[in-house]
Image (tube, rainbow, N blue to C red):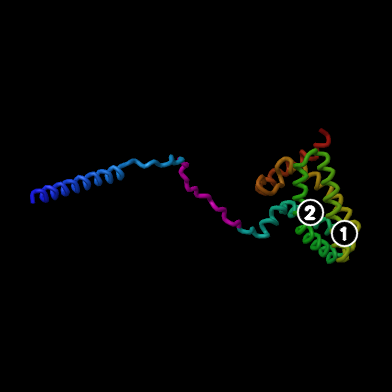
């Protein structure tokens, strides 16, 4: 009996020792540091709010038309040329004269703005003499060819005299417009002055233009 009891106690003690050693191994296994590959530090990604451009609204056709239409030249040229046609056709009767006046006024009101804008472009071109020669050739040839066609089709009586006066006025008017535009007058666009300021400067500009060939 004593041998059995002794062997039983030994088995219990041995089993307790084995369980304690197994627990220690598990604890060491749990607490053993694990080797991990060094992580490569990557820069933090920042969310950048990029502004998405809004689709541009189509500009009205009138806005684009006004950018290439010199309304100052259109108004002045239409009034002066229509008056010349009125005077040139006065001998054919007042009805014919006023008919020519109305046709020239309408034609020049529609086209002189574009020719004025072309003259404004020549005013800032270099060299000056080349730009002036181009303005005196290109603009008159185009404008007077159309002018002749309009008045020929409508039957203006004194057609030759009317076109001759208009061509003479074109030469003087183009030179004066180049002179004035190079001094900041009769311009349209971002650098344009109000029409009241241009008219206020007209007497002085005309006087300087008349004496400029003698300087």
Name the quadrant containing residue 207: top right
Labels 2 & 1 near each other (Cβ < 8 A): no
Q: Position of residue 109 (x, y in %)?
A: 76, 58
Which of the two labelled residues, at mark 2 and mark 1, occupies the earlier sequence position? 2
Q: Quadrant of residue 134?
A: top right
Q: Nearer the viewer, residue 38 or 76?
A: 38
Instruction: Give whichever of 138, 172 is nearer the camera.
Output: 138
Measure the alpha-carbon separation of dots 2 and 1.
17 Å
Magenta residues?
41-56
Q: Secondary structure at mark 2?
A: helix
Spot occupied by residue 96 in the image (x, y as percentages of width and height):
85, 65
Identify residue for label 1.
148
- Please give the residue where the numbered disc 2 appears in the rendered image: 80
On the rendered structure, is 9 left or right of 70?
A: left
**Foreground residue among 208 and 111:** 111
Q: What is the x, y in percent for residue 66?
A: 69, 55
């Amino acid at each position: 009996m004593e041998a059995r009891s002794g062997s039983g106690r030994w088995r219990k003690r041995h089993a307790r020792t084995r369980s304690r050693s197994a627990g220690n191994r598990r604890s060491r296994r749990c607490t053993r540091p694990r080797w991990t590959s060094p992580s490569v530090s990557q820069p933090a990604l920042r969310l950048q709010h990029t502004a998405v451009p809004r689709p541009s609204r189509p500009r009205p056709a009138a806005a684009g038309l006004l950018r290439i239409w010199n309304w100052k030249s259109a108004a002045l040229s239409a009034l002066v040329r229509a008056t010349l046609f009125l005077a040139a056709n006065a001998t054919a009767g007042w009805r014919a004269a006023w008919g020519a006046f109305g046709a020239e006024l309408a034609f020049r009101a529609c086209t002189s703005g574009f020719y004025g804008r072309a003259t404004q472009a020549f005013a800032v071109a270099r060299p000056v003499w080349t730009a002036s020669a181009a303005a005196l050739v290109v603009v008159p040839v185009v404008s007077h060819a159309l002018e002749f066609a309009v008045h020929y089709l409508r039957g203006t009586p004194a057609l030759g005299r009317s076109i001759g006066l208009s061509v003479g006025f074109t030469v003087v008017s183009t030179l004066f417009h180049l002179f004035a535009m190079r001094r900041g007058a009769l311009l349209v666009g971002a650098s344009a002055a109000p029409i009241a300021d241009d008219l206020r400067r007209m007497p002085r500009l005309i006087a300087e233009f008349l004496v400029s060939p003698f300087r």
